[in-house]
Image: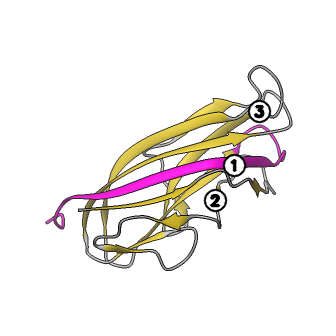
Amino acid sequence: VSQSRYRYHVTQAIVIASADTHVEIDGGFTGGELNLCTFPDDHYVLVQKAGRYRVDYSVSISSDVQGKEIESAIMINGTAQSKGTSHAETGIGGGGKPNVLAGNAIFDLNANDQISLSAANHTDTSDLTMQHASMVVQMVGGSNP
C-alpha cells in the first residue's frame, strides 16, 4: 500500500521571510499511484485511513548565496516534524549549486492528516530555489492501539 508524488525539472522559489522558520514547499507537484491517500491539491497528500505510515523524500535545493545552512523536513498538517530532517550548506563549490537533502520517518497518522515537505534557511532570510522533489508515503501498519 503506497502513494507517491513527484516533481521534476520545475524551478520554484521558496520565499524565506524569517530565518530558522520552515516554509511549506507549495505547488507544482503531480500525484503518482494513490492507495489509501488522495492528492487534493498540488502540494500535499491527504491520508484517508488512520495508521502507521513511512514517508521517504528527497529535494534538490539551491541558493544564490553561498554558505547558508538549510534544512528540509516532513510537515504533518502544516507543522515541520523533527523526525526525518536533512541539513546542507548551500553553494558548495559556488553559489547556485543544488544540494540534495533527503530523509525518512515513520508517523502514526489519523484520517485526513496532510503530509507535505518544507525548507528552512537557518542562517538568514536569503530565498531558496527548489528544482526537484520526490516523496513516497507507504502504510506500514494499522492504527496504533
Mark found first going from the N terminus, 1 or 2: 2
**3D distance between C-alphas at marks 1 and 2:** 8 Å
User: Which mark is in front, 1 or 2?
Assistant: 1
Magenta span of residues: 121-145
- Amino acid at circle 3: Lys
Image quarter for residue 61? top right
Q: Is residue 62 above or below residue 38?
A: above
Q: Along the line of sight, which residue is nearer the eye, 127 or 10?
A: 10
Disc 3 + disc 2, Cβ < 8 Å:
no
Q: What element does badge 2 sit on? A: loop
**Location of residue 54 in the rendering, given as x and y in whole percent from the top left corner:** 31, 52
Q: Which mark is residue 130?
A: 1
Mark found first going from the N terminus, 3 or 2: 2
Disc 1 + disc 2, Cβ < 8 Å:
yes
**Location of residue 119 in the rendering, given as x and y in whole percent from the top left corner:** 64, 50
Q: Is residue 79 above or below residue 129?
A: below
Question: Magenta stretch containing residue 142, yes or no?
Answer: yes
Placement of the N terminus among the 4 image quadrants: bottom left
Residue under label 3, please give it.
68
Which residue sits at x=62%, y=48%? Answer: 132
Residue under label 2, please give it.
25
**3D distance between C-alphas at marks 3 and 2:** 18 Å
Q: What element does badge 3 sit on? A: loop
Main secondary-structure element of the magenta-colored stretch: strand
Question: Magenta stretch containing residue 116, yes or no?
Answer: no
Q: Is residue 143 above or below residue 120?
A: below
Q: Along the line of sight, which residue is nearer the eye, 13 or 124?
A: 13
Placement of the C terminus among the 4 image quadrants: bottom left
**3D distance between C-alphas at marks 3 and 1:** 15 Å
Q: Along the line of sight, which residue is nearer the eye, 19 or 74?
A: 74
In the image, taking residue 133 as reference, residue 2 lies left or right, namely left
Crowdedness near tag 3: few (<14), some (14–19) or many (≥20) residues, C-alpha within 10 Å: many
